[in-house]
Image (cartoon, rainbow, N blue to C red):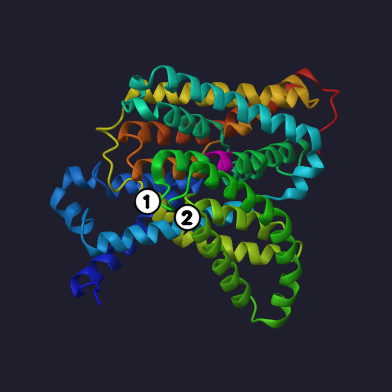
Amino acid sequence: MDKLAHHEVINLLIQLSVMLIAGRVLAEVARQLKQPSVIGEIFAGILLGPTILGTIDPDAFSFLFPETGPSALVLDGIIQVAVVLLLFIAGLEVDLHIVKQQGKQAIFTSLCSLALPFALGFIFPYLWPEFFGFYHEDKVLVFALFIGTTMAITALPVVARILMDLNVFKSSIGMLIIASAMVNDILGWLIFSVILSMMGTNDGGMSIGSTIALTIGFTLVMLTVGRGLINRSLPWINRKLAWPGGLLSLSLALCFLAAAFTESIGIHAIFGSFILGVALGDSEHLTERAKEILHQFINNIFAPLFFVSIGLYINFIESFNPLLVLAITVIAFSGKITGATIGARLGGFSQYRALAVGFGMNTHGTLEVILGAIALHEGFITNEIFVAIISMVIISIVSSAPLMKYSLKIDREKNPDTPPLF
């Protein structure tokens, strides 16, 4: 049986140690600057990768992070597991009851904030693919769909943190943004799962039609029958099995099974883990303490490994194209802010409160990074496009809170008689 050599085990352990330490240090720096930890973790990867370490000391970088070999393969496997777990806890954030409570406001806001940025993100790459560095004429449609989807998704975990920092999480605006972002996540991932099949990543031997049908069927079953079975089983699990060990092990086992199923039908494993997370997180018997344990375990161990890994094999300076970054950022911002603002206005919000919703919904983050990383790993997009997406994500995260705060301030000044947010 093949196994890692002695020096390869040592190399792998050093890789994991360095990535976790660098990720934690820069995540703390980001927190001090009142930014999400993910920004610090991405910069940790840039520091350890060819952009900084590879430029200063190429030999040290090659020794620490070899591009080939058993240790590199094992590290890649760990990163794949990290992505699956990240989408699992993203699914746990989706609360279907909140979506129902917000009613038509959430539907208007989510659909408008999904449709307009998707349309803009589709049109420009479809008409001018060469500008975006895409030269595969037979896959221009798929490429345009990919960019459109990336522009349309709102990063639920990141926007939730921003709303809490602004102390508006439990307000009418906060609940609308959260509910709309949840709908965005589900629809966006469903669309992206289909796009993955069209990229040519379907290794299950199925036709695209069969894959799409199975994907929709899996989603419907998991969010109805599956959700009901999980809800009925959790009280028994909490009562009969060691807590929290039994719940954690079974949750992760189901997560991996769902991920394996969607991977087997030609959809990326992350979709299965995300939908399982939605079904599990919606149960009234999954306590907040159990969710917090899962979040702490994954966010502080596996999440840093993934986000640090983003910068390990890309030179962000060499791949930085200012025009492409500007184009991606303008498309993302204009589509998302305008679409969400229109949706909130249709839902009955005043002008500046609706604009605040638009700025909140414009928060991109974890999911877009994961989408880009998968597409890059599949060789579907270039390093320049990936760097442009990362740059857009960072700009949106940094700007969302100040812009929301400013809009709400203007709203209070212009409409002093308007009922308070809470």
The 10 Å Cα crowd at callout 1, few under 14, some 14 to 19, many 20 or more, is many
Q: Residue drawn 45% across and 19% down? A: 124
Please name the predominant secondary structure of the magenta segment in the image.
helix
| Residue 249 to residue 354: above or below | below
Residue extending farthest to the left is 59
Residue 292 percent coordinates (x, y): 62, 62
Q: Quadrant of residue 76?
A: bottom left
Question: Which residue appears at 55% of the width and 60% of the height?
Answer: 258
**In this rendering, position of residue 260 left or right of residue 52:** right
Query: Which residue is found at the position 58% from the left and 50% from the top?
Result: 214
Q: Which residue matches tag 1?
A: 308
Label 1 element class: helix
Q: Which residues are magenta?
A: 188-192
Reading the image, the residue beneath label 2 is: 263
Q: Is any part of residue 97 visible from this angle?
A: yes
Residue 176 lies within the magenta run: no
Query: Residue at horizontal 41%, vertical 22%?
Result: 326
In the image, residue 37 sits, relative to residue 353, either above or below, namely below
User: Where residue 128 appears, x then y in whole percent?
Assistant: 39, 17
Under mark 1, the amino acid is: Val
**As shown in the figure, which amino acid type bears the numbered disc 2?**
Glu
In this view of the protein, can residue 168 be seen by the observer? no
Drawn side of residue 100 relative to residue 47, left or right: right
Q: Earlier in the sequence, mark 2 or mark 1?
A: 2
Specify the quadrant of the image occupied by residue 357. top right
Q: Is residue 265 left or right of residue 219?
A: left
In the image, taking residue 122 as reference, residue 135 lies left or right, namely: left
